[in-house]
Amino acid sequence: MLSKGSNFISLSDFTKEDILATLSLIQSYDDQNLKRFIPNKKKLLANLFYEPSTRTSSSFFSAATLLGHEVLSINEVKFSSVAKGETLEDTIRTLASYVHCIVLRHPEEGSAKKAAAVSDVPIVNAGDGTGEHPTQTLLDVYTIWKHWQKLDGLTITLMGDLKYGRTIHSLIEVLKKFDVNINLIGPKDLRLPKTYGSYLESTELTENLAMGTDVLYMTRVQKERGAKGNYALTKLDAENLPPSSIVMHPLPRVDELPTWFDSDPRAKYFEQMQNGLAVRKCLLDRILG
Amino acid sequence: MLSKGSNFISLSDFTKEDILATLSLIQSYDDQNLKRFIPNKKKLLANLFYEPSTRTSSSFFSAATLLGHEVLSINEVKFSSVAKGETLEDTIRTLASYVHCIVLRHPEEGSAKKAAAVSDVPIVNAGDGTGEHPTQTLLDVYTIWKHWQKLDGLTITLMGDLKYGRTIHSLIEVLKKFDVNINLIGPKDLRLPKTYGSYLESTELTENLAMGTDVLYMTRVQKERGAKGNYALTKLDAENLPPSSIVMHPLPRVDELPTWFDSDPRAKYFEQMQNGLAVRKCLLDRILG
Amino acid sequence: MLSKGSNFISLSDFTKEDILATLSLIQSYDDQNLKRFIPNKKKLLANLFYEPSTRTSSSFFSAATLLGHEVLSINEVKFSSVAKGETLEDTIRTLASYVHCIVLRHPEEGSAKKAAAVSDVPIVNAGDGTGEHPTQTLLDVYTIWKHWQKLDGLTITLMGDLKYGRTIHSLIEVLKKFDVNINLIGPKDLRLPKTYGSYLESTELTENLAMGTDVLYMTRVQKERGAKGNYALTKLDAENLPPSSIVMHPLPRVDELPTWFDSDPRAKYFEQMQNGLAVRKCLLDRILG
């Protein structure tokens, strides 16, 4: 699991027990001290982003910095050596000789694994295209677990783009390890690929479905994908969702999650994002030792 | 005024006394230690720039770093979440959960106020379009005050683009609080909007005007704006300006401020820029406590 | 040579003895502590890159940070003040008032010298177009010297683009100060300019030439330059090169240096790159004192 010097590429090898142990560990970082600096044996970390993701890179920067480390931010890779045809492997070998850990965001699936294969220092996967974005998944699962203090027995409704949403796919992969009831709401053209399993599917969030939901996890339906139907949260949905339920979203949101819901106690998407800081502090602290 | 945890959005609420107290405070930072590191209770600051401004972001970075803080620089906002349609408010809420203070540069007037409305951490306005750029104004006023040790009684000549120059407008707003004599020199097409008040106007820096000037504040007249006439400093102007006067410019300059004047003791534009460091150190130190 | 507060613009004034003293000095930084943080009297350094060079900027960032200093990275100069027509001199004057040292990368020859002429703080040349990239040259020479513990008496074969390769030109300028035997291998259209001297030239790496080589320094031949012939390392070349020889490359590489050679003990290009960290730590430590 998470130990000094280890890579963090994927959650697929984590057992149910590993996940639960990790969630408890994260919680130990998620306290009053979340934004306080921790004195540390300083390390140097590279934030190597082949595609921009302000949210993710900022969160890693903040986590590392608050742990007392230093961060080399590399955002313009595409304009540089890479443009001259350098392979990911050569770039990683280079950077690995300058820093103690590399956080990698790359548009191609499998690139984190490729990087780990040649790197002398730990690689942390910050999203590899249609592959995984395991810290996002951890913060999603952590947010659910933090609220419910369990995963087994929950009914989790996933709404939006179920076909292309990497976030949704990765979340399902972890939830499958638990005794969780999954409902899917989305347009017919954007159904969940069969490889992720078969669950109850609906094209709308009916009163019944809403009332039985413990966690509503929403994602954006991009207009370019031409899907019909409305997958925005309505006032009626808000009425139907139980008082104890929570509403999540990986952000950025557009219209599907109206701002009038922000002040609702069930709105957990901003807390979810902040949980990302706890997740990344925990992870980096374990890996950098 | 400037106190721990406060936002810094605009100078419009500062009274004459507030301004004078602030100038004295800045001076306490403007000493031998200007570029020395100060040990501090470290904080994490985000430099969130929606449009590039190397000078301003570097100055804030330097100020925060020299105060012992850490800086998360975000320059590529437009390529990221924002491109996906995220609102400024959501971006601010996200960042506010990662850092202790946000320095915001944004092309739209009113955005600093908008950001402050949703932020859990102090917002410092580093320029919001046609709105204000209050640290620039403070460093301008501080430069005048530092030289003359007063503002009341001075004759200040503003030359260049008086219509679009935000720097000029903001400076006038502060100078109006004092007993200052303002002269305006600029092309007919680029006159000062009436809302800022009525002052003596001329299309050239005559011998008389120059001789009566204590502070000549120059700005660029962009060629695209099609103004006629020459608003560059001439050798004759330099002769006419009193030995005790000073010449200022917000930089970058092009032709209007010839390099032969740089070694003149009245040339204060580089010192003016360095004063920006004192202003920002003072400001951040007060706000971050 | 390298002393507190000095600029580092060019190696052209370094005598043979200066070079040897510098190499020894570098070696004192190239130890177990290469990636350990050194507590220091913290300084603030600007990494001012007018053109992207991830490798070089990362290496300087890492060197400065590991020495305990702070780095202000400026990569987007072209989008900012400069786009408004600001001269390099004005940008340097500005930055010099915010930081303690400026590492400058600029596409125009002579810009480092120009910058040093107006700067209050030391300027380190990180490459000025067709001019020099003296830390690259130092790391090249250091890599050779580290392996052979001498330079005099060596046979050094330079292969690739000899006409446009700044790296090659600068390396030759230093090697000329020593009693070194230089061989040149490259396409007829990309011959070494006469100003660098006359050496044995060949259009291919013959068996004889390979067998007599102590150091093979390869560079890329850009296809756009329309040169014919193959200047990639072949299995036969690898057989012919002596067991004690080393193969170098400034990176990034493309096809000319096949990955099957990476595990060969003579492949020194990744170590060469890591030597860049030792060189830059040494340099900055001397200059920042």
Image (cartoon, coloured by chain):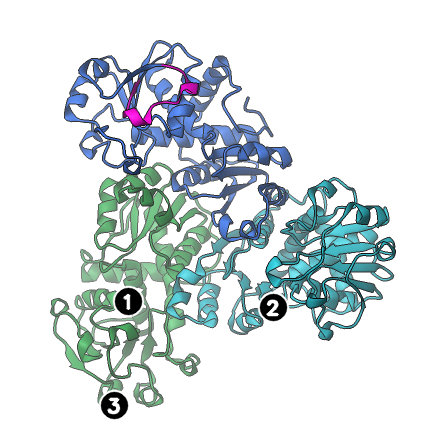
Chain colours: A cyan, B blue, C green
Mark 2–mark 1 contact, CB under 8 Å? Answer: no
Residue A130 is tagged as 2
- Sooner in the amino-acid sequence: mark 3 or mark 1: 1
Host chain of mark 1: C
Residue C201 at x, y = what percent?
Answer: 16, 80
Gap between marks 3 and 1, in whole Å?
25 Å
Span of residues in magenta: B184-198
- Numbered disc 2: secondary structure: loop
Name the kind of residue labelled 3 in the image: Glu
Residue C207 is tagged as 3
Quick one: label 3, few (<14), some, or many (20+) residues within 10 Å? few
Name the kind of residue labelled 1 in the image: Val
Q: Judge whether residue B187 is colored magenta.
A: yes
In the displayed structure, would residue A227 be above or below residue B59?
below
Gap between marks 3 and 2, in whole Å?
49 Å
Residue C102 at x, y = what percent?
Answer: 34, 46
